[in-house]
Image (spheres, rainbow, N blue to C red):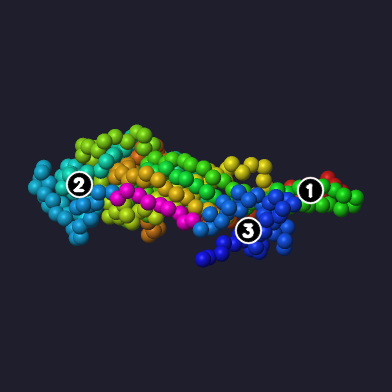
Amino acid sequence: MSLKKFACPCCGAELTFSAEAQKMSCEYCGTELDVEAVEALSSNEKADDSMNWDSYDSENLTPEDGSCAYVCNSCGASIVGDKTLAASECPYCGSPVIMSDKVEGMMKPDFIIPFKVNKEKAAEQFKKFCSKRPLLPTGFMNDHKIESVEGLYVPYWLFDCDCDADLRFRAERVTHWTEDSYDVTKTDHFLLLRKGSMGFDHVPVDGISKVDNEITEAVEPFATKEAVDFNSAYLSGYLADRFDEDAESCKPRANQRIKQSVINAMERTALGYASVRYEDGNVIFNDGKIHYALMPMWIMTAKYKDKKYTFAMNGQTGRFVGELPVSMGKFWGMLLGITAGLTALFTLIGMALA
């Protein structure tokens, strides 16, 4: 037989029931909690997150090893690609080619979001992106060399689920007042319990290792409501990769994204506090479903002073992200200008006070 104890969430000492207060009380720090709250805390401490997903039918979906060779139907040239290549163009005659064995049958994605932004728009967006960077080297737009502009369908796993959450937060409320000649600050500490349910549709996790996760997440969100049933015709004229990270390996990232969204949503219900921070809790996933989809993305690489820079744009919404070089001369010039301006301002204030 095991003995059940209720630990004080503030100091760790044992809580006892106070007949006078009709609450659970800590004799060391004075914390008092309702019985229902203590029981809920005890349940939270014992429960674990349950994140179960239906298995995606992965038969014959394991990425094969090595490279693959194809023959262009237009000129007869041999096209060699890696194991994830699903669509490309012939390097000899420029004809679009689709590797049908990668997209037919079990390889067929559930959904696809067709490109809405063309190559010209992508190039225009790149120029706008650069024009808004005041620290960009003066010669970058003239000296840089765009090495590639590729329209790429990136493979994604989309996760649907319902969630039941039971979370605990710490909050503070700060009050200031003056008492005689003293300035008094009072900080009240609160234990907040939040419980609720919510649903998620099409939480995206990319399934390709060759594109950095920071890039794929930065160009989100995609309007998945505009996704259509897959048709290989959408691939024509673009590059397309099939996944090399299966649904199973992507589940931890999906779980983390969903759980963090639940925490953020429940934290926003705690109003009127100076600060709120998540402490502990558990999230139970129900009715988890997984879909396989292709999302449109423009990938650009530019070379400037022997360094490569990668840029990406959401092929549906036009959202643009990327890394740009920084002119240290402009940086220090801007910093000195700000410093000089502040010095002049403080001098004028000092003269006015004098």
Which of discs 2 and 3 lies nearer the camera? The answer is 3
Q: Main secondary structure of the magenta part?
A: loop
Q: Residue at x 20, y 60 (%)?
A: 65
Mark positioned earlier in the residue sequence (1 or 3): 3
Mark positioned earlier in the residue sequence (2 or 3): 3
| Quarter of the view holding residue 329 | bottom right
Mark positioned earlier in the residue sequence (1 or 2): 2
Q: Nearer the viewer, residue 3 or 210?
A: 3
Q: Name the residue under label 1.
A: 176
**282 on left or right of 184:** left
Distance from label 2 to label 3 (Cα)?
51 Å
Q: Which mark is residue 7?
A: none
Q: Which residue is drawn at 27% across and 41% down?
A: 110
In the rendered image of this protein, does residue 240 appear above or below residue 327?
above
Q: Mark 2 points at which residue?
A: 106
| Quarter of the view holding residue 286 | top left
Are the two marked residues, 1 and 2, in contact with CB atoms closer than 8 angstroms? no
Distance from label 1 to label 2 (Cα)?
65 Å
Q: How many marks?
A: 3
Q: Residue at x 66, y 59 (%)?
A: 15
Q: What amino acid is at disc 3?
A: Pro
Residue at the limit of the structure toward the front, as seen here:
1
Residue 52, percent from left and from top: 37, 51
Q: What amino acid is at disc 2?
A: Met
Q: Mark 3 points at which residue?
A: 9
